[in-house]
């Protein structure tokens, strides 16, 4: 996919995330908007995973450890053809599979997540198995910065470093905010690069909204042969909608009708800058 196509997709995905959260009257808005460029690049430009190969053992794996941002994942999986997009109109309704956290009942989802701190350990297990079986697949995990307060992540970091899992890539959606405050207020992570390096990981940093930089970095895995890769993606919670950006209350939140119109208008304006004919 070209750089422009990826940038257009990101805006379209943001519009859809808001559309389905607004319709469902529920959702983790800010964190979905902060990680969507990462998912866009992974699914459209990096990973070897699709509805056609999902049953095969040697496909790549993606497990979204910050499971609460599931609306971003639903929108991307629908776009990849894992299920018809209109099914997202059932989001958060009684008996719908499209609940507020990922479950394997939804086509394309590898693992149930949502209880923070589980995804990376599962990915590390998958990476060990692939290494032993000689399968040429890559395993990707998306982590939240607040999520790193869970000690289980650090066990997985230690294991992956020890076993030299260079088929594993963890991406940190580093928006520096959690539910109740900033990382600095609740649980600081710095120096996160030095900590991961001390655990035996190769670390890179990137602007997590720059699809070109994301694509270039994620297409150069492993960052170092014989080491797991850790990508610090600097992001903004609520990215793309002016009144949501960097605002704690939009961790989860449903726009009012006027706010919804404004958000869609802002995203349409971004689309028009990229593609004036639209
Ligand atoms: C084990 C566990 N504890 C608490 C929660 C509730 N919870 C949901 S999201 C969240 C904050 C996560 O912050 P972060 O990982 O930074 O996510 P982001 O800001 O990117 O949305 C918390 C504490 C949870 N899902 N799982």
Image (cartoon, rainbow, N blue to C red):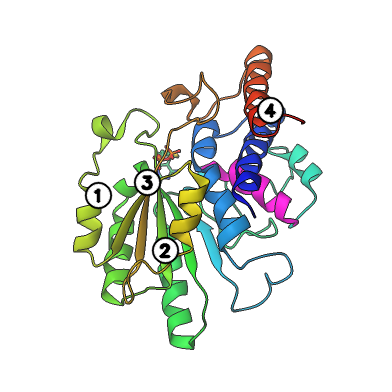
Where does label 2 land, which residue?
169
In this view of the protein, can residue 227 be seen by the observer? yes
Distance between mark 2 and mark 3 Cα atoms? 16 Å
Nearer the observer: mark 4 or 3; the answer is 4
The reply to whether the magenta stretch includes residue 37 is: no
> Which circle marks residue 272 in the picture?
4
Picture layout, residue 126 above or below residue 3? below
Spot occupied by residue 170 in the image (x, y as percentages of width and height): 40, 59
Picture layout, residue 16 above or below residue 46? above
Distance between mark 1 and mark 2 Cα atoms? 15 Å
Viewport quadrant of the C terminus: top right
Residue at 52% in and 59% down? 63
Say if disc 2 is inside 8 Å of ligand 1: no
Spot occupied by residue 99 in the image (x, y as percentages of width and height): 64, 44
Where does label 1 land, which residue?
192
Secondary structure beneath disc 3? helix
């Amino acid at each position: 996919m070209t750089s422009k196509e990826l940038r257009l997709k990101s805006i379209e995905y943001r519009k859809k995330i808001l559309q389905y959260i607004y319709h469902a009257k529920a959702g983790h808005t800010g964190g979905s908007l902060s990680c969507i460029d990462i998912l866009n690049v992974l699914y459209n430009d990096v990973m070897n995973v699709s509805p056609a190969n999902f049953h095969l053992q040697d496909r790549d794996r993606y497990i979204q450890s910050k499971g609460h941002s599931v609306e971003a994942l639903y929108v991307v999986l629908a776009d990849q053809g894992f299920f018809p997009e209109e099914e997202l109109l059932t989001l958060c309704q009684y008996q719908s599979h499209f609940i507020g956290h990922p479950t394997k009942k939804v086509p394309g989802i590898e693992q149930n997540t949502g209880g923070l701190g589980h995804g990376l350990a599962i990915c590390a297990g998958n990476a060990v198995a692939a290494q032993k079986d000689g399968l040429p697949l890559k395993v990707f995990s998306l982590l939240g910065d607040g999520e790193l307060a869970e000690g289980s992540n650090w066990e997985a970091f230690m294991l992956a470093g020890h076993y030299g899992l260079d088929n594993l890539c963890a991406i940190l959606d580093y928006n520096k905010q959690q539910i109740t405050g900033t990382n600095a207020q609740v649980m600081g992570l710095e120096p996160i690069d030095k900590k991961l390096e001390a655990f035996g990981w190769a670390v890179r940093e990137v602007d997590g909204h720059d699809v070109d930089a994301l694509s270039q970095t994620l297409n150069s895995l492993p960052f170092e042969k014989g080491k797991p890769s850790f990508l610090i993606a600097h992001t903004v919670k609520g990215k793309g909608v002016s009144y949501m950006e960097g605002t704690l209350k939009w961790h989860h939140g449903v726009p009012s009708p006027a706010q919804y119109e404004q958000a869609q208008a802002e995203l349409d304006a971004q689309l028009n800058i990229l593609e004036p004919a639209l």
